Image (spheres, helix red, strand yellow):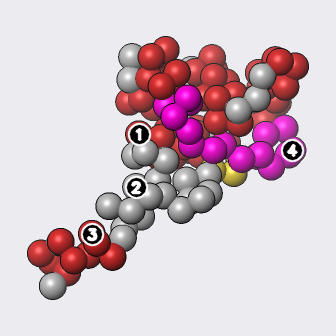
Amino acid sequence: MTKAKLGAGNIDIELDGETVTLRPNLKAAQNISRQKGGIMAAVDAVGKFDFDTMVNVIVLGLGVDGKEARDIPEKVYSTGMADLVAPVINYLTILANGGRPVSETTDDDDKTDPQNR
């Protein structure tokens, strides 16, 4: 298994007219998992348009605090949750996969996969 390439799991989202980047990190994975009872529970909540969960995931993914973090709810509301659900769920899936996109394969994976002989 190889380590994730720098930026491989980053997800760009449009937030109130500005492109920002959610970056997978251990702190985000731990906090989301602890707050929601697992990352899958957060995926479920975001899929059900749970506003607070979406805001929390975005704040942790952006790594912001203070005033920047307090501004995120208004930006999420202004953007509209419908446009954010898919990329935020994608980000959560990447978090659950150790910061790597799920579809990412490595040369080592190809060598051990019996179908790729």
Give the mark nearest the N terminus, 3 or 1.
Answer: 1
Pointer 2: what residue?
Answer: 102
Mark 4 vs mark 1, foreground winner is 1
Q: Who is closer to the viewer here, 8 or 19?
A: 8
Q: Residue 2 at what x, y percent from top left?
A: 39, 62
Please determine whether, in this image, residue 45 is positioned above or below residue 105.
above
How crowded pointer 4 is (Cα within 10 Å; few <14, some 14-19, many 20+) is rated as few
Numbered label attached to residue 17:
4
Mark 2 vs mark 4, foreground winner is 2
Q: Secondary structure at mark 3?
A: helix
Q: Which amino acid, by three-letter code, is at mark 3?
A: Asp
Q: Residue at x 69, y 28 (%)?
A: 59
Q: Secondary structure at mark 2?
A: loop
Q: Residue at x 12, y 75 (%)?
A: 114
Q: Residue at x 77, y 46 (%)?
A: 20
Report the Cα–Cα distance between label 2 and label 4: 28 Å
